[in-house]
Amino acid sequence: MKKITVFSLLAMFAALAFAQSTGNVEHGKMLFMRNGCYQCHGTVGQGGQAGVRLAQLKLTQVGFIAFVRNPPPSNMPPYRAKVMSDQDLADVYAFIKTFPEPPPLKSIPVLNE
């Protein structure tokens, strides 16, 4: 019983450490470009015909990694650990979180006519 408890605690701490890992923005940008993410999602996450907008992504890092590993049926390929490690995806996530917020609607003149 004690072995199971110790193992469970270690697994929980490992999961928390990973969930809070920080990513390298520059490496994430390089991976985003090299792996062709920009082709569907745009260079600043604006999205396009083939990919959803990533700017203002609401997923947590853990949720993002889970989604990228097993995307729903679509044109997006799954990025398994052989292609991008969990740390690589943490770096991509860090890069995505740097995408700028869109301007407020009130600041767009044509929308206020």
Image (cartoon, rainbow, N blue to C red):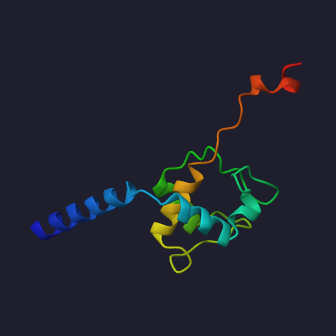
Pick the residue in front: 52 or 41. Answer: 41
Left or right side of 38 for 65: left
Where does residue 92 sit, x and y in percent of width and height?
Answer: 55, 61
Q: Which residue is most to the bottom? A: 82
Q: Quadrant of residue 68?
A: bottom right
Query: How many labels sit on residues?
Result: 0
Where does residue 25 sit, x and y in percent of width and height?
Answer: 53, 58
Q: Which quadrant is the N terminus positioned in? A: bottom left
Q: Which quadrant is the C terminus positioned in? A: top right
Q: Is residue 69 above or below residue 45?
A: below
Determine the residue positioned at 69% across, 52% down.
45
Q: Is residue 104 above or below residue 48?
A: above
Determine the residue positioned at 55% across, 68% down.
69
Determine the residue positioned at 66% across, 72% down.
34
Left or right side of 110 for 64: left
Where does residue 42 sit, x and y in percent of width and height?
Answer: 74, 56
Left or right side of 43 for 5: left
Q: Is residue 81 above or below residue 41?
A: below
Q: Which residue is most to the top? A: 113
Pick the residue in front: 42 or 8. Answer: 42
Q: Which residue is most to the front? A: 26
Can residue 66 be seen here? The reply is: no
Where does residue 110 sit, x and y in percent of width and height?
Answer: 88, 26
Left or right side of 78 for 14: left
Can residue 73 be seen here? The reply is: yes
Determine the residue positioned at 56% across, 45% down.
58
Q: Is residue 83 above or below residue 10?
A: below
